[in-house]
Image (cartoon, helix red, strand yellow):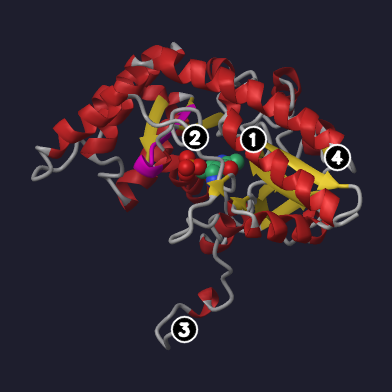
């Protein structure tokens, strides 16, 4: 730490992204990326856009915003495109959380939420999830705080039905409820249609998972126009050119090829069902996930051992250290070949540790 750092940042614990390994080739199941490449039109669009990199990109991202608004059947003023969905989540902490209105989220959820709260110097509170890792919607009624719910939740993969989320939104009419739908395209039902009815709902989504564009950094928020105006005030105060020209063009091309991505999601869902069945046969407890990952705990081998032994065998999964989830590993769903390789490695591990 230099002697120049703002004193209150001295204790800041940053978010730790999943490892992007260099050197050895791993079967990479640790960061919930898509195993499928972007559609060829996406690559072509990004290349073409690169010709114009001498100019700034459109700060309003008007073309892509219109495509997304049409796709979701909302007005363009209800959509804001961002640099990954992490950016819009941070904007929401900046815009809607403060000393008198702390952030509130489950104790087992996306690890970036507390970091966003800390860097913005806003207080936050957490509510414990149930023993089965599910969320009790009633715990969030009348909270008087800005609520963040990942749905499906991460790293558990558990989905909360839309009418139960709607109840949380209804019971907090004077507070913003942010529904983080990073993993919604793998079987869940989106809350986007509710944004027309409730002026306190912000839904965030991403191109990183179902649309194979994690490296391009593209996310979005959908909400009532006034919420989007507030978030635009934050965006234009921090980073007006937040979505670069190549990413913007790639996003439009991806939306023109929705069928390709929908088919990939169907394959991921099939592979998730296959992996869940096989893991259970090997003695793992596995949540019913509606995301592109599963959260699994073995009946006798520790979460850390599974993680380390898989790593030795060339398979990377994500292990978290907080006490409540240290027995688990989060395993991204890849191709059928990758899932079969994972299961073979786990068969060996469970055999070796008998
Ligand atoms: N929300 C959740 C729950 C996530 O797991 C992630 C991925 N790490 C994100 C948001 C952010 O994804 P991105 O910034 O790539 O859109």
**Precedes in sequence: disc 4 or disc 1:** 4
**Does the beta carbon at disc 2 come under 8 Å from ligand 1?**
no
Residue 3 quadrant: bottom left
Q: CA distance from mark 4 to mark 1?
A: 17 Å
**Quick one: SS at disc 3?**
loop
Identify which residue is drawn at 69% across, 46% down.
330
**Precedes in sequence: disc 1 or disc 2:** 2
Q: Which residues are magenta?
A: 215-222
Is disc 1 in contact with disc 2, using a CB cutoff of under 8 Å?
Answer: no
Residue named by callout 4: 285
**Precedes in sequence: disc 1 or disc 3:** 3
**Precedes in sequence: disc 4 or disc 3:** 3
**Quick one: SS at disc 2?**
loop
Is disc 4 in contact with disc 3, using a CB cutoff of under 8 Å?
Answer: no
**Quick one: SS at disc 1?**
helix
Q: CA distance from mark 1 to mark 3?
A: 42 Å
Mark nearer the viewer, 1 or 2: 1
Residue named by callout 2: 35
Residue named by callout 1: 339
Residue named by callout 3: 1
Q: Position of residue 107 (x, y in %)?
A: 76, 50
**Precedes in sequence: disc 2 or disc 4:** 2
Identify which residue is drawn at 87% across, 39% down.
132
């Amino acid at each position: 730490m230099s002697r120049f750092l703002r004193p209150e940042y001295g204790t800041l614990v940053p978010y730790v992204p999943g490892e992007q390994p260099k050197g050895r080739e791993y079967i990479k199941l640790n960061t919930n990326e898509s195993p499928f490449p972007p559609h060829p039109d996406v690559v072509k669009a990004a290349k073409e856009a690169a010709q114009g990199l001498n100019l700034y990109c459109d700060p309003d991202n008007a073309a892509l915003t219109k495509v997304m608004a049409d796709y979701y059947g909302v007005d363009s003023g209800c959509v804001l495109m961002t640099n990954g969905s992490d950016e819009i989540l941070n904007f929401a902490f900046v815009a809607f959380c403060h000393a008198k209105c702390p952030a509130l989220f489950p104790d087992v959820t996306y690890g970036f939420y507390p970091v966003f709260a800390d860097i913005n110097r806003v207080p936050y509170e957490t509510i414990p999830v149930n023993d089965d890792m599910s969320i009790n919607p009633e715990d969030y009624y009348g909270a008087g705080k800005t609520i963040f719910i990942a749905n499906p939740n991460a790293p558990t993969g558990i989905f909360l039905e839309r009418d139960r989320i709607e109840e949380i939104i209804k019971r907090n009419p004077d507070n913003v409820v942010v529904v983080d739908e990073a993993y919604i395209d793998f079987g869940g039902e989106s809350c986007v249609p509710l944004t027309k009815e409730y002026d306190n709902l912000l839904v965030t989504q991403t191109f990183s998972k179902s649309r194979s564009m994690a490296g391009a950094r593209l996310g979005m928020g959908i909400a009532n126009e006034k919420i989007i105006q507030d978030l635009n005030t934050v965006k234009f105060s921090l980073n007006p050119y937040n979505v670069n020209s190549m990413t913007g063009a790639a996003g439009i091309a991806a939306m023109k090829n929705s069928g390709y991505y929908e088919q990939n999601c169907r394959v991921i869902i099939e592979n998730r069902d296959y992996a869940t069945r096989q893991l259970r046969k090997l003695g793992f407890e596995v949540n019913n996930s509606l995301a592109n990952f599963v959260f699994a705990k073995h009946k006798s081998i520790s979460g850390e051992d599974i993680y380390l032994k898989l790593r030795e065998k060339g398979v990377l999964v994500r292990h978290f250290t907080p006490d409540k989830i240290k027995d688990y590993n989060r395993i991204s769903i890849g191709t059928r070949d990758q899932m079969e390789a994972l299961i073979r490695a786990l068969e060996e591990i469970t055999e070796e540790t008998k």
